Image: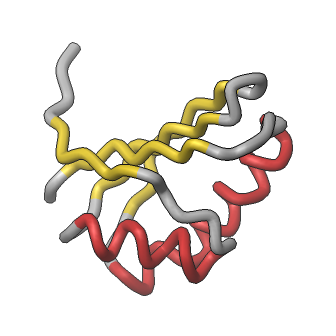
Amino acid sequence: MPLYMDVHELDSPVTAADVAQAHAADLQTQEKYDVSYRRYWVDEDGGRIFCLVEAPSAELAARVHREAHGLEATRIHLVQEGS
């Protein structure tokens, strides 16, 4: 299945706790769309969030975020995992 890295660039700082709540909502929603949010990273001061997701398409990955919590990615990149 394709692997994507999405990037959220917010207008203000974000807390790791807030992102953890959003990620939990993604996990509750993802199965409906055959999506798997695998990991995420947070730049609290910079207001940036990075999510690694397996999904049939970038649109379905975005749909999970939209439905789960409304926080849409600024960009979604198709990536290949390395070591």
Looking at the image, residue 49 sits to the left or right of residue 18; the answer is left
Residue at the image position 45 percent from the left and 53 percent from the top:
74
Looking at the image, residue 16 sits to the left or right of residue 34; the answer is right
Q: Position of residue 3 (x, y in %)?
A: 22, 48
- Give the total of numbered labels: 0
Q: Position of residue 4 (x, y in %)?
A: 27, 48
Looking at the image, residue 1 sits to the left or right of residue 15; the answer is left
Residue 33 appears in which quarter of the rendering? Answer: bottom left
Residue 6, compared with residue 22, is above or below; it is above
Q: Quadrant of the C terminus?
A: top left
Residue 9, compared with residue 59, is above or below; it is above
Q: Quadrant of the N terminus?
A: bottom left
Looking at the image, residue 23 sits to the left or right of residue 12; the answer is left
Residue at the image position 83 percent from the left and 37 percent from the top:
15
Residue at the image position 32 percent from the left and 75 percent from the top:
60
Q: Position of residue 50 (x, y in %)?
A: 50, 38
> Which residue is at the far top?
83
Instruction: Please state which of residues 39 and 18 is positioned toward the viewer in this rendering.
Output: 18
Q: Position of residue 82 (x, y in %)?
A: 18, 20
Instruction: Please state which of residues 37 and 48 is positioned toward the viewer in this rendering.
Output: 48
Residue 55 appears in which quarter of the rendering? Answer: bottom left
Colour pattern of the rendering: secondary structure
Residue at the image position 69 percent from the left and 35 percent from the top:
47
